Image (spheres, rainbow, N blue to C red):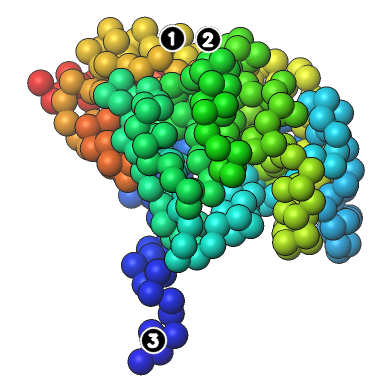
């Protein structure tokens, strides 16, 4: 059997299922307008400045990028006030997550700890690496139960993943709380704080550990260009990490995983303060509006510091999801997170948010 060649850890894997895309849904339900509020993408789309930079650099597509994208690392370093040598860029933060696991965790021996539910990539890449993945259930209100986490960590634990703000709940722990956790965990554990949504936390300085990056020899901070910077399709993320880990990540990383247009676009996005501010204001106002309106419609919401809201509808979640889909609105069912009763909606533009509420109200009224 050919299958004998496949490693046993991999046999149960399923390909990532992206769901229907906008065109498919238009055809299936005979719709002319479909809006997607499912993947936490930037509600304002791609910044006009970045579009122009991509167009201007299109002719460079035949060139290899420079290994390690040094110009981008320098730009990020300047932007965050961190030395460029402590920044490693990847093909989305997904790539960095995968590399960190394989850099430090020995297959069949070590383990990795995260909460449950958590971002699926932590688990998938741990399993692919042949490393035990331990999950500690979040508390009922979706806060982080630290004592349970400490109990799960042992001398074979190499990485702890914490998503802050968390996905899918939107909960965000304060910086002081995370500092206390870092001082309690042994330095032999890499503590990876995934700050994919930190740009939407207000005020950011109360939540981000970035200003602390030098204080802990085992702290890794992950960031992405996929959300605030509107570049999910170009695939660009990065880590801020201590010298030794940055050095070794650069050694093991595939040299050209960040493409030449992503590098140019990333640098342009960092300089586009106008788009950043516009996005932040859109998300802040939309988050407030949607929380209020969802509550008005009888949905329980959870306070969110991210660009999405998790909510508990008063009727069956899959019915609500299907009902919205037929009306051309795609949101995210949370079944794959083990949260069958919950839904997640990404904050859209003002018009999208209003339309979502209008259609949701109709779906809820129809199901009474
Ligand atoms: C969206 C997201 C990311 C970003 O992944 P990329 O590979 O950079 O697109 C990382 N972590 C979490 C928890 C996310 O939700």
Which residue matches tag 3?
4
Please state, as top left, top right, bottom left or bottom right, where the N terminus lies in the image.
Answer: bottom left
Q: Secondary structure at mark 3?
A: helix
In this view of the protein, which residue sits in the foreground, 104 or 90? 104
Give the image location of residue 361, x and y in percent: 26, 17
Question: Which comes before the other along the chain, label 3 or label 2?
Answer: 3
Which residue matches tag 2?
285
Give the image location of residue 348, x and y in percent: 50, 23
In this view of the protein, which residue sits in the foreground, 227 or 53? 227
Find the distance from the CA under tag 2 to the CA under tag 1: 6 Å
Which residue matches tag 1?
289
Please state, as top left, top right, bottom left or bottom right, where the C terminus lies in the image.
Answer: top left
Q: Are marks 2 and 1 in contact (CB under 8 Å)?
A: yes
For mark 2, does the 10 Å Cα neighbourhood hold few (<14), some (14 to 19), or many (20 or more) residues? few
Q: Residue at x 79, y 51 (%)?
A: 247
Give the image location of residue 288, x and y in percent: 46, 9
For mark 1, does the 10 Å Cα neighbourhood hold few (<14), some (14 to 19), or many (20 or more) residues? some
Residue 310 can be seen in this image: no
């Amino acid at each position: 059997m050919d299958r004998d060649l496949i490693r046993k850890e991999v046999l149960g894997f399923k390909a990532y299922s992206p769901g229907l895309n906008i065109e498919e849904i238009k055809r299936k339900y005979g719709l002319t307008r479909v809006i997607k509020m499912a993947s936490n993408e930037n509600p304002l789309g791609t910044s006009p400045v970045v579009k122009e930079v991509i167009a201007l650099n299109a002719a460079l597509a035949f060139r290899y990028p420079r290994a390690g994208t040094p110009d981008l690392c320098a730009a990020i370093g300047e932007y965050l006030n961190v030395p460029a040598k402590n920044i490693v860029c990847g093909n989305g933060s997904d790539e960095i997550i995968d590399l960190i696991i394989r850099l430090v965790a020995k297959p069949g021996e070590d383990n990795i700890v995260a909460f449950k539910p958590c971002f699926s990539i932590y688990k998938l890449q741990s399993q692919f690496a042949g490393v035990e993945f331990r999950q500690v259930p979040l508390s009922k209100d979706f806060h982080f139960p630290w004592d349970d986490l400490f109990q799960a960590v042992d001398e074979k634990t190499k990485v702890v993943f914490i998503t802050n703000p968390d996905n899918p709940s939107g909960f965000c722990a304060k910086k002081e709380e995370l500092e206390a956790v870092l001082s309690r965990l042994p330095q032999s554990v890499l503590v990876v704080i995934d700050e994919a949504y930190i740009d939407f936390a207000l005020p950011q300085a109360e939540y981000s550990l970035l200003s602390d990056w030098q204080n802990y020899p085992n702290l890794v901070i992950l960031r992405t260009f996929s959300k605030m910077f509107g570049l999910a399709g170009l695939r660009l993320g990065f880590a801020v990490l201590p010298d030794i880990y940055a050095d070794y990540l650069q050694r093991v990383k595939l040299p050209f995983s960040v493409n030449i247009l992503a590098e140019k676009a990333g640098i342009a996005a960092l300089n586009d303060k106008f788009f950043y501010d516009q996005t932040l204001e859109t998300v802040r106002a939309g988050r407030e509006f949607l929380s209020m309106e969802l509550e008005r419609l009888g949905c329980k919401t959870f306070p969110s510091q991210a660009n999405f809201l998790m909510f508990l509808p008063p009727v069956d979640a899959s019915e609500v999801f299907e009902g919205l889909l037929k009306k051309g609105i795609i949101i995210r069912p949370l079944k794959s997170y083990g949260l069958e009763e919950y839904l997640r909606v990404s904050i859209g533009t003002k018009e999208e948010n209003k339309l979502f509420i209008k259609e949701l109200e109709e779906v809820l009224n129809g199901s009474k």
